Amino acid sequence: MTADQRAPGRPLLNRRLAEFGTTIFAEMSALAVRTGAINLGQGFPDTDGPEAVREAAVRALRDGRGNQYPPGPGIPELRTAVADHQRRWYGRLGLDPDPDTEVLITAGATEAITAALLALLEPGDEVIALEPYYDSYAAAIAMAGGTRVPVTLRPDTGNTGDSGGDGSAGEDGDARPAGRFRLDLDELRNAVTDRTRLILLNTPHNPTGTVLSREELAAIAELCVERGLLAVTDEVYEHLVYEGEHIPIASFPGMRERTVTVSSAGKTFSFTGWKVGWVTSTPELVAAVRSAKQFLTYVSAGPFQYAVAEALALPDDYYTRLRDDLRAQRDLLSQGLSDAGFGVFRAPGTYFVTTDIRPLGESSGIDFCLALPERCGVVAVPTQVFYDHEAAGAPFVRFAFCKQQEVLADAVRRLKGVVPR
Ligand SMILES: Cc1ncc(COP(=O)(O)O)c(C=O)c1O
């Protein structure tokens, strides 16, 4: 506190950000360090990405490429690589952005989302976000003066076998229960008002691990077109889909011109610290996002942009191996959690598996996660912190499986020590 703040008792942090203290990840990671527990809380891999990509970054540094401000929209090599990537994976769905006008490089997906919201929202505009949501969304909406309107994803218990890919639930002694988190389309429709400006989507979805099905996405797209809404879609886990497929919402009828698609290199190439992300959209929407982005960071990660351009061009088998390895890790952890007595939801995508702790005789994920390091030497994250409707998330706990097999095997052994109360 300084002496003269004109308004005695006025808090330093402004009203828009007052509810956002330190993130749960910082708290849980500190707990992991203090107790020596295995940290399955935060979603970062414990092995770095491809050697060749690291070498590309070193080469760029040494050759003096990107050591000074790169171009504001991103280096042409990376914009071209992003456009090629979109065409390679989604060209059959009609996505083929122009690298000069329809691609913008950002400081990770986080800046892309924040810049999009700062660019597109007027104060008081409502933003529908799927709850539980990635923690930066609420803060970014608040910084842009928007009002968040959560629509809750809820776990089902049945095996409906839709194209979201959960068709084999419970088969062959598979311990994962039939059930993933789904969108209630009526709830979504009812959440739209005259003040709704955009829907902030995330698929594959953190923290639930769900992947929105074609039917869910088609319904969202129809709603956007019918009500004249924009969509900002966070697709950072686009390559981490183990069942079913990732379908960009920009590929649905009427959506290309109203969708800002966001992704980044962190998850796909296991370089979360590099913070290289991108936006693809129409020239008009890209220009709008750029207007905000230029005053946030202007540019970032110069030499890493060259390396990510090379990474995006890696052959298909890189992407296949990444997915297959992570699928095996998911299965190992899901089975172990199930054996330890947790209710385990299907995770058709992402790095995360969500569990229900009620079968263990527990009801508060927060209390459970605070005690877990002492009880068995593992750190997890209570999903409740990603909800506005806290009661809806109280019994759910998220575990990250982007860790080496030995680490996960050790965690699974430890988790057996969580005896139901
Ligand atoms: C859904 C989601 N979006 C965005 C991010 C952050 O992406 P980046 O590191 O590229 O900013 C994460 C990281 O965990 C995430 O889970």
Image (cartoon, rainbow, N blue to C red):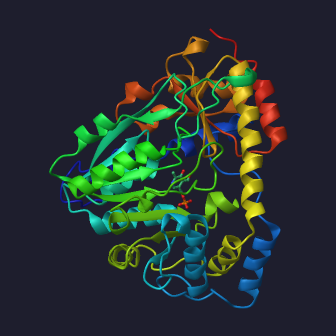
> Foreground residue, 242 or 380?
242
Looking at the rendering, in which quadrant would you find the N terminus?
bottom left
How many numbered marks appear? 0
State the residue lying farthest toward the front: 92
> Foreground residue, 296 or 226?
226
Q: Could you tell me residue 59's position as x and y percent?
A: 77, 84
User: Quarter of the image holding residue 41?
Assistant: top right
Report ligand 1 position as a quadrant.
bottom right
Question: Left or right of 272: which side holds 205?
Answer: left
Q: Could you tell me residue 380's position as x and y percent?
A: 62, 34
> Foreground residue, 379 or 3?
379
Residue at point 46%, 70% (across, down)? 279
Q: Could you tell me residue 103's position as x and y percent?
A: 47, 77
User: Quarter of the image holding residue 415?
Assistant: top right
Looking at the rendering, in which quadrant would you find the C terminus?
top right
Residue at point 72%, 43% (across, down)? 327
State the residue lying farthest toward the top: 421
Question: Left or right of 237: which side holds 290?
Answer: left
Question: Left or right of 177: which side holds 414?
Answer: right
Question: Left or right of 320: which side holds 125?
Answer: left
State the residue lying farthest toward the left: 194
Q: Could you tell me residue 186's position as x and y percent?
A: 29, 35
> Foreground residue, 390 or 186?
186
- The answer to whether one can see residue 37 in this image is no
- The answer to whether one can see residue 222 in this image is yes
Residue at point 77%, 48% (across, down)? 325
